[in-house]
Amino acid sequence: MSTDKKADIAVVGLAVMGQNLILNMNDHGFKVVAYNRTTSKVDEFLNTSAKGTNIVGAHSIQEMVDQLERPRKIMLMVKAGSVVDKFIDSIIPYLDKGDIIIDGGNSNYTDTERRVHALEKKGIYYIGAGVSGGEEGARFGPSLMPGGAHAAWPYVKDIFQAIAAKTPNGDACCEWVGNGGAGHFVKMVHNGIEYGDMQIISEAYQFMKEHLALSNDDLSATFKAWNKTELNSYLIEITANIFAFKDKDGNYVIDQILDTAGQKGTGKWTGINALELGVPLTLIAESVFARCISAQKSLRVEASESYPHKIAKANTKDHDNILNDLNKALLFAKITSYAQGYMLMQEASTIHNWSLNYGDIALMWREGCIIRSVFLEHIKKAFDANPKLTNLLLDGYFKALIIEALPSARRIAAKSIELGLPMPALTSAVSFFDGFSTKRLPANLLQAQRDYFGAHTYERLDRPRGEFFHTDWIGSNSNVSSSSYNV
Ligand code: NBP
């Protein structure tokens, strides 16, 4: 039953995420006002899942604002994009200086950055909080990644850390991420990493199905076994369940699903940001493109008729060795992908002055979200031990794993190319690693070509960095070099 005490927070948006977050807050003793544009949903909610709880409803912005403790805290769980701007505009006249708006949707971090600054000028605090874990996470403990106006953090910290998922040690999977759009940036990278994890698992599935001719039951058993290795994670666990799942007629559901993947944009944003910041985020980018090629079903069907090929089957006596290689190849690709994701966050943190805490980020992803895994505990340890770690691949623990897994990753990558089995994410991981660990790349030739056709100049091995040279490659006797773009 509701009490007369003013409410701690309001949540706007009563779709699946909003309703579940409200119930979660209520479970933790917070009084919540529920509001939705279509107000009939407020009554529906109060008369169903919220019945008998301390949750109260509002049918107008005025009614919502009047029921809130000051500073007022209003969390938006609405569709990302212009809806958020429209709602902010409509609520501003009802707010006072020091009130707090929190956007828990999947907003683009640049929008959050803009909103934080615009509202700061009006004296309103704005927090952009990444929320991960879907419906179940929202209900029983999501991973929360809040960033924006730091002055507002003490007012929402208790609520956020109470409702967040907890690690096995009892730590909340929610810490302050940084100013501006840092929270939504980190959530975006989380989603990109999720794309990568899903893609490498799917590539392993196709390899096992086509080359090893494993049945769905075998696949389920393999993923179940892999869930007891370093790959232990929510995504491996649900993958094992998916292969075992049959419909009421006894047919495997996985075999009835059309092979075209959808996407909502956060993987694409991660790739675009990586390109803009010059970070080699190859595995996630390949994962986004893999979804794009999957979506071109009719073209693929046509091309498969023009270029028919059969995937050779492995000898069953080799299965155990190949499965062992595949398990290690997946671990190799996963480490590489996380290393790339962290490279992107490190670059963004420097550029935006976010001072991201990389150990905390691993902690926030440890439970509650889609990429939750034991693996993240080791990332936390690596960055806690050395907050200035330049790259995850240079940490001792991960280095040992990489050295052990690399031969397997090479064998699987080479085999996939020989067989004609697409493994773009896995093969990109091997190529990235080889580039990353190669002292001298052929970029000297790129520089020569650039200087040859565009007088773009180059630096020399025998001269200090920052000195640029131009060669008259074609004997034009011209000393003019380009200044329009640089290395
Ligand atoms: P949706 O993303 O489907 O949004 C539905 C909500 O937005 C409803 O409350 C709807 O009100 C409201 N809304 C719309 Br649409 N247009 C509006 C407008 N012009 N003014 C005010 N409200 C408007 O809900 P969701 O799936 O619960 O997700 C909420 C947010 O959380 C999204 O940003 C989503 O990307 C993010 N997220 C979702 C998940 C997930 O697993 N679903 C996970 C993590 C984050 P109405 O009832 O009046 O139409």
Image (cartoon, helix red, strand yellow):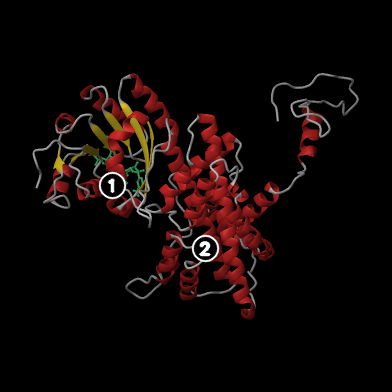
Location of residue 347 by image quarter: top right
Label 2's element?
loop
Pick out the residue farthest to the bottom. 317
265, 471: nearer the viewer = 471
Disc 1 residue crowd, few under 14, some 14–19, many 20+, Cα 10 Å = some
Q: Residue at x 53, y 35 (%)?
A: 348
Query: Which residue is identified by label 1?
Result: 162
Residue 357 in sight here: yes
What is the x, y in percent for residue 32? 19, 41
115, 478: nearer the viewer = 115
| Distance between the alpha carbons at the discs numbered 2 and 1 | 29 Å
The answer to whether 482 appears left or right of 54 in the picture is right
**Marks 2 and 1 in Cβ contact (< 8 Å):** no
Q: Which residue is drawn at 48% across and 59% down?
A: 259
What is the x, y in percent for residue 132? 38, 48
Location of residue 447 by image quarter: top right
Q: Residue at x 63, y 80 (%)?
A: 317
Task: Establish if 226 lies above or below 6.
Answer: below
The answer to whether 262 appears left or right of 331 in the picture is left
The answer to whether mark 1 is within 8 Å of ligand 1 is no
Task: Establish if 54 lies above or below 231.
Answer: above
The answer to whether 395 appears left or right of 148 in the picture is right
Q: Quadrant of the C terminus?
A: top right
Q: Which of marks 2 and 1 is nearer the N terminus?
A: 1
> On residue 230, which mark appears?
2
Q: Which residue is drawn at 21% across and 50% down?
A: 27
Q: What residue type is labelled 1?
A: Ala
What is the x, y in percent for residue 274? 56, 39
